Amino acid sequence: MLEQRKLPMQFSWVACEPNCRGWVSAVGVVTADSPKEFDEFARGRDLGGATIVLDSSGGSVNDAIALGRRFRQLGVLTTVGTSVLTHGALGDHGNIRPDAYCESMCVFLLLSGKARYVPGQAHVRVHQIWMGDRADDAKAASYTAQDLMIVERDVGRLAKYTFEMGGSGDLLALSLSVPPWEDLHELTPAELRLTNVVTTDQAVDVLPPAQSTMPVAAAPKAVHDRFVSSSTAETDAQPTRSTKTAEAALPTVNASASAPAK
């Protein structure tokens, strides 16, 4: 059974009753449909200042940027974790397990929060953006001038977004120094602060009071593959195409008519 983080991103409201305000769970890979699906999810809900809990392997560069800007417009708070629901006599109660992954473009979604917290057990990992359809064997692949233009254009877009969100150039430098044939780089606590990915070391600054202790998950997670969407990404129950990098894409849906970057 595929883990949710390997499927297209889904949004859900996790209720936390009776003494908790709840939060938005955002799990999976960002695809061309994600910004629109978030708009549909947000319709009729007051999400201003809400907490978004991320568990994602990344996704399309341009669509993650669009989604991150929607998050920032709402003034959300962000963190990394896996949402679980416990059924009790007083009703369902949400909990957050901190041993989750936020990789590739998920890191830039995390950056969209006005306040950002990463628990010690979470894994925040970065790498270069690349043509998604050639990331598995990037050294042997062929590239055209158009492909290079797409990647450089999307690097520029990502840089602009990073500074808009309050991130530092160090985040870009760390990400862009890791090619697709190398393992993703896991940001250390010092690097999380250096890059401004985190703004606080206190869970209570981003989580409802009942969740400020960030309970540790009972079962550890294995290291996960990175996944990226393409302009023809599967939706619903279909897994997204596996790659080792982000996707750079042309100016259509989630990127390009060729291969997107992320």
Image (cartoon, rainbow, N blue to C red):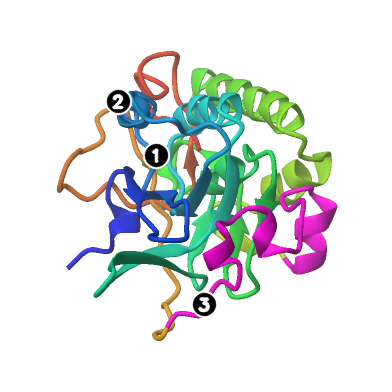
Mark 3, residue position: 215
**Image: 229 above or below 186:** above
**Residue 183 seen anywhere in this rendered image of the structure:** no
Q: Residue at x 55, y 57 (%)?
A: 208
In the shown orientation, is residue 66 left or right of residue 218? Answer: right
In the shown orientation, is residue 89 left or right of residue 207? Answer: left
Amino acid type at mark 1: Val
Q: Earlier in the sequence, mark 3 or mark 2?
A: 2
Mark 2, residue position: 40
Q: Secondary structure at mark 3?
A: loop
Which is more foreground, mark 1 or mark 3?
A: 3
Classed neighbour count for the residue bearing mark 1: other residues with Cα under 10 Å, few (<14), some (14–19), many (≥20): many
Q: Is residue 216 magenta?
A: yes
Whether the residues at callouts 3 and 2 have beta carbons within 8 Å, the answer is: no
**Picture coordinates of residue 21, whole percent (x, y):** 47, 51
Amino acid type at mark 3: Pro
Amino acid type at mark 2: Glu
Q: Which mark is residue 30?
A: 1
Q: Secondary structure at mark 2?
A: helix
Q: Is residue 164 magenta?
A: no
In the rendered structure, which segment of residues is drawn in magenta?
188-217
Q: Residue at x 73, y 41 (%)?
A: 172
